[in-house]
Every structure is written in structure tokens, then in C-alpha cells.
């Protein structure tokens, strides 16, 4: 719906004075279909949602007598400010999130690097323990070789490596029997059996060490790869964070310019006088900007339902119309 626009060269004097003051009074005293309990003046005057109200009458380009009501909508401006504030908060969150996102992924890389280091240390410690065990078993073999009938009773679980403890009881029984029968050769058999058990343990440890060395090589290779990834990720994250910060800062600056260009919300309704009777032409919501005005036609129900509420809280229909106007005012980056 397109409304009559004032032809200022034809307009009368301001507001309620001048040649058309009577037309304004007639409109104010009239009633509009759907709200019979109120006059138009009762609905539209002294509204809490309006910071100021203006009535004027003029001749339009077709020579018609037009009465125009204007509400400078403080409530509308507050609502649009809430939309602006929400957009600023989102941009600020993006700006804050750039550093937080970088820190979060840096922590993940740190944890992965730490885990690789822990695994490498555990494997290195295990390697050292197995090598120490082999050295102990080799010393055990030397000691076992020196055992005689006179000293074999001294051999117990605490005198040899723990891995040989399962063979000690058998050796002790053999020692007792060899002493009783005075058979050094029988003792040699038991000593050789114990030495063979030690050699078997050495062989097992050597096999485990070979496997462990392979694992250590793999772990060290993975650790190097992780270190490379960490450094690459750090560079990539820093670049991404810089880009995101720049974009967010640009968005914030654009939003500030966008809001600076906004001057207010104006609600306009018009009537044309026909045979001294007012005929409702229509209503619109104007988004007043520094360089232009965006006009959104609205229904009588939207305007007069809002006016009948006489409050600062806007109806959902009114908010929808404001959003439609706001969406026609894009943010320029």
C-alpha cells in the first residue's frame, strides 16, 4: 500500500493550526472499524510507545485533503537496538572465541605431545629394566657355576633373580639329595638345569627387547610426526585465529557504522477527507536512516492493536514489521 506523501508547497501551516486544523480534529474524533470503543484520538494520542506524536494536514499532489499522524516510536527503536545488540554480541563472541578456539586446540596438541612423551619414557624405562634383568641373570649363571656341595644349601629364592624363584625348590631338593648321597655329579645336573632356566629367561628378555626396540622406534617416529603436526597446527591456528579476529573486528566496526546510520522508527497513518468525512488510507512503519527512509506498509490492525495496548511492549506482528524494515537495511562491510 502506498500512502499520500506531503506536497509541502501545497501544505497548510503546521500541525493543528491553519486552514486544515478542522480536518485533524475530525479525524481524531472519528472511530475506526474494529475498535468502536475508542476514537482515533484516544487510540493514537499520548501513547507510551511514542516519544512524540504529530498531527498535520496538507494537500497532496492530487489536490486531496490529507491528515497524517506520526508517532516517533521509542519502543520500536528500543526493539531494533536489541537486534543490533544481539548482532554485536555474536560478533564479540566470535572475536573472543578466536583466542579460545586456538587455546583449546593448542591444549589438545599439548596433551597428545605429552602422551607421546609418556609412552616413550615408559618404553625406555622398560628397556632399561629388561637389560638390567639380563645382567642379573648373567651374574646368576656365574654364581650357579660356582656352587658346590658345601655351598648349595645357601641358595634360596632371595639369592637369585626373581624370575628363577620357580626353579629354586627343585634345585634345593636336588642339593639335599646330592649331599646325602655325596654325588657331586647329581648336583652338576641340577646346576645345569638352573643355568638353562636362566638362559631361557635371558632369551625371553632378549626377544622382548627386540620387540620393544621396534616399538620405541615407532613411538619416536610418531613423536616426531606429532611434533611436526603440532608446529604446523600452531601456525595454521594462528593464521585462522588472526583471520577470524580480523573478520570479527570488521564485523563489529561495520555494525557500529550500521547503527550510527540509524536515526529512528516512525509510525505513520493517513486519512483523506471526502465530503468532510475521514477515509482511512493506510499506515506504514518508516525506518529513518541518515541517508534515506525505508517504508514498510502495515495493516490497520497492526497499528491499532498496538495502540490499544498502550504499552512499551510490542506485539509480535509489530516486531515482525520492524524486522522486515531492518532486513532491508543491510550491514555494509
Image (tube, rainbow, N blue to C red):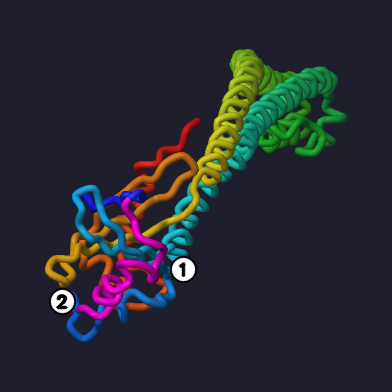
CA distance for labels 2 and 1 = 25 Å
Q: Which residues are magenta?
A: 10-30
Label 1 sits on a secondary structure element that is strand
Q: Is residue 26 left or right of residue 333?
A: left
Q: Is residue 240 left or right of residue 6?
A: right
Residue 23, quarter of picture: bottom left
Label 2 sits on a secondary structure element that is loop
- Estimate the x, y position of residue 27 in percent, counting from the top left: 25, 73
Is residue 295 or residue 258 the one in the foreground?
295
Q: Can residue 187 be seen by looking at this rendering? A: no
- Estimate the x, y position of residue 322 in percent, counting from the top left: 35, 55
Q: Residue at x 22, y 64 (%)?
A: 271
Dot label at residue 34: 2
- Estimate the x, y position of residue 204 in percent, counting from the top left: 62, 20
Crowd class of label 1 (few under 14; some 14 to 19; many from 20; radius 10 Å):
some
Determine whether 241 is above or below 261 in the image. Answer: above
Determine whether 239 is above or below 39 in the image. Answer: above
Dot label at residue 311: none
Dot label at residue 52: 1
Q: Residue furthest right?
A: 150
Q: Earlier in the sequence, mark 2 or mark 1?
A: 2
Q: Residue at x 15, y 76 (%)?
A: 34
Q: Is residue 222 left or right of residue 6?
A: right
Crowd class of label 2 (few under 14; some 14 to 19; many from 20; radius 10 Å):
few
Contact check, label 2 and label 1, Cβ < 8 Å: no
Amino acid at each position: 500500500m502506498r500512502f499520500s506523501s506531503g506536497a509541502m508547497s501545497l501544505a497548510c501551516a503546521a500541525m493543528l493550526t491553519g486552514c486544515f486544523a478542522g480536518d485533524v480534529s475530525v479525524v481524531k474524533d472519528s472511530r475506526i472499524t474494529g475498535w468502536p470503543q475508542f476514537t482515533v484520538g484516544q487510540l493514537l494520542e499520548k501513547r507510551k510507545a511514542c516519544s512524540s506524536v504529530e498531527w498535520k494536514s496538507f494537500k497532496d499532489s492530487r489536490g486531496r485533503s490529507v491528515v497524517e499522524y506520526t508517532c516517533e516510536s521509542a519502543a520500536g527503536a528500543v526493539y531494533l537496538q536489541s537486534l543490533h545488540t544481539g548482532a554485536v554480541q555474536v560478533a564479540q563472541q566470535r572475536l573472543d572465541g578466536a583466542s579460545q578456539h586456538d587455546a583449546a586446540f593448542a591444549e589438545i596438541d599439548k596433551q597428545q605431545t605429552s602422551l607421546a612423551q609418556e609412552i616413550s619414557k615408559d618404553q625406555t624405562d622398560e628397556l632399561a629394566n629388561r637389560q638390567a634383568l639380563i645382567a642379573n641373570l648373567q651374574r646368576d649363571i656365574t654364581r650357579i657355576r660356582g656352587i658346590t656341595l658345601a655351598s648349595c644349601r645357601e641358595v634360596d629364592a632371595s639369592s637369585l633373580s626373581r624370575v628363577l624363584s620357580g626353579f629354586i625348590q627343585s634345585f634345593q631338593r636336588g642339593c639335599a639329595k646330592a649331599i646325602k648321597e655325596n654325588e657331586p655329579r647329581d648336583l652338576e645336573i641340577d646346576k645345569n638345569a638352573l643355568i638353562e632356566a636362566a638362559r631361557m629367561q635371558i632369551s625371553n628378555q632378549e626377544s622382548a627387547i627386540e620387540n620393544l626396540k621396534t616399538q620405541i622406534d615407532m613411538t619416536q617416529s610418531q613423536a616426531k610426526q606429532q611434533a611436526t603436526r603440532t608446529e604446523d597446527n600452531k601456525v595454521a591456528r594462528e593464521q585462522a585465529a588472526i583471520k577470524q579476529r580480523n573478520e570479527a573486528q570488521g564485523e563489529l566496526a561495520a555494525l557500529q557504522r550500521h547503527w550510527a546510520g540509524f536515526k529512528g522508527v516512525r509510525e505513520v497513518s493517513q486519512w483523506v477527507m471526502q465530503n468532510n468525512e475521514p477515509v482511512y488510507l493506510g499506515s506504514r512503519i518508516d525506518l529513518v536512516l541518515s541517508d534515506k527512509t525505508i517504508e514498510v506498509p502495515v495493516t490497520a490492525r497492526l497499528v491499532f492493536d498496538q495502540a490499544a495496548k498502550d504499552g512499551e511492549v510490542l506485539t509480535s506482528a509489530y516486531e515482525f514489521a520492524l524486522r522486515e524494515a531492518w532486513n532491508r537495511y543491510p550491514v555494509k562491510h
